Amino acid sequence: MKVLIVGGGGREHALAWKCARSLRVSQVFVAPGNAGTALEPNVKNVDIAADDLDGLLDFANAEAIDLSIIGPEGPLVAGIVDKFAAAGRRCFGPTRAAARLEGSKAFTKDFLRRHGIPTAAYRVFDRDSFDAEQIRSQKLPIVVKADGLAAGKGVLVCDSHEAAIIAATGMLDGAFGTAGHRVVIEEFLSGEEISFIVMAHDQQVLPLATSQDHKRRDDGDCGPNTGGMGAYSPAPLVDADLHARIMREVIAPTLRGLRADGNPYTGFLYAGLMVAADGTPNVLEFNCRFGDPETQPIMMRLQSDLTVLCEAALDGTLDRARADWDERAALGVVMAAGGYPGAYHSGDPISGLDVAARLPGKVFHAGTRAEASRIVTSGGRVLCAVGLGDSVSLAQRQAYDLVHAIHWNLVQYRRDIGHLAIARERR
Ligand code: AMP
């Protein structure tokens, strides 16, 4: 079979790598891919942007693609699944209506409240309804969120009322383009954050291995929020009881609610959860796709054929499917361009990829491109180095051995990915 992966980041490299290892797959295409996917056996890059829905459908028709898997949220929110389905092309992901769960935070908060799913208290404002006094009456810290898609950067945790008011008015004035035309002001939740990702088809669910990511740029989970600086799987916090609770209190009512609202969901569904001290799994956000960088460690552990699982979902037999996992832990460290998540430099030659390729583990590319005979940086998050090990500490060691082999001008990465899990291992 022929598979098309849409997107060009680390998540798509991991999905393409995984699909290309399947014996049923003759060819994987990635649109547009990156320098890493270009080098992967059985994988070809196609020069079509992830948001060029017409171009992607023309390509899928011309190549008779059997299965398309959509990486980023942009094309899903724009309706790529509806478009492919109308043309009779199998495409794993939610419809445009179901993808609103990620496309609008205000929509999602209303959805959560309506369906009784645990989440932080909130208010939604637009320019007309904005009320600084309301914000002054909130307990600190205050979380300010742009309503729409802002590449993981539209969330600010503010320690003073003035900072929250400035953040909110900045968003309403266009700091995040149209994404900030509405803002969500949210109660700050404490606890430990986990990523809970499932494959879903209407009410059928296959939970994937648990994971945890690090959203802050700097060691100790400090500094600005990013798209994600590293992740590991499994998340030791999620024992059988918490797993059952998340399935019962979050995943099942979400899929029931989507169906009740007339938008049954097919695809990867990612719940970003803040687990409170009493175990309450509060929903921070939903993503309508696999996480980046969670995909990289999770794909390293998945032993089942991903294409079989996607097809089971599309065939309505997901309830009979099972996913087998490598018992070992996997941990990925994101290597980013200096300056990220702010303005960053591009075009720096990357050295040491050949050395890393001979070490255990796997380096997934994200913001990279080939230039003459070199590979250079071309994005904020550039690489994700993933190690495997019998414990999170051992996986971490393998991942950092890869990181230490690679270099470019002003490279930055965190030195403590997995610290919470490792502290737990040492207890
Ligand atoms: P979101 O895009 O809504 O997941 O927010 C990005 C990040 O901001 C989350 O991963 C959390 O680390 C943090 N965050 C968001 N909402 C809250 C909240 N209500 N309380 C504490 N931290 C939050």
Image: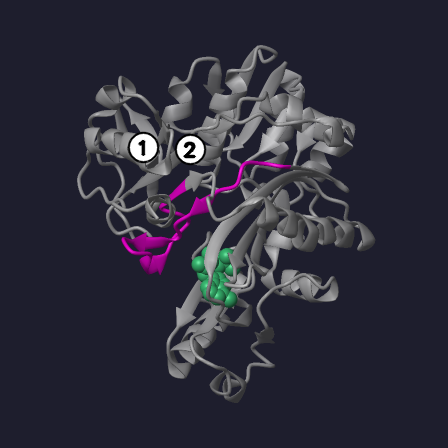
Magenta-span inclusion, residue 222: yes
Q: Secondary structure at mark 2?
A: strand
Camera-side residue of 76 and 25: 25
Say what amino acid the circle numbered 1 marks.
Leu
Residue sitting at x 19%, y 44%: 410
Q: Is residue 358 above or below residue 127?
A: above
Identified at 63% across, 46% down, the residue is 78
Amino acid type of the residue tagged 2 in the rendering: Ala
Q: Nearer the viewer, residue 194 or 56?
A: 194
Q: Which residue is mark 2?
A: 329
| Mark before the other along the chain sequence, 1 or 2 | 2
Examine the rendered structure and indicate whether residue 90 appears above or below residue 178.
above
Identify the secondary structure beneath mark 1: helix
- Magenta stretch: residue 273 in it? no
Q: CA distance from mark 1 to mark 2?
A: 8 Å
Image position of 332 (left or right of 4): left
Nearest the eye: 238 or 256: 238
Position of residue 98 relative to residue 323, above or below, is below
Viewed as shown, does residue 257 lie left or right of 415? right
Q: Which residue is mark 1?
A: 394
Q: Residues in magenta? A: 207-231
Q: Quadrant of the N terminus?
A: top right
Q: Looking at the image, can residue 224 be seen?
A: yes
Image position, residue 207 (x, y; %): 62, 38
The answer to whether the residue labelled 1 contacts the one labelled 2, judged by CB atoms less than 8 Å apart, is: yes
> How far across and down, in percent of the image, does residue 327 sit?
48, 28
| Side of 226 relative to 123 (left or right) | left
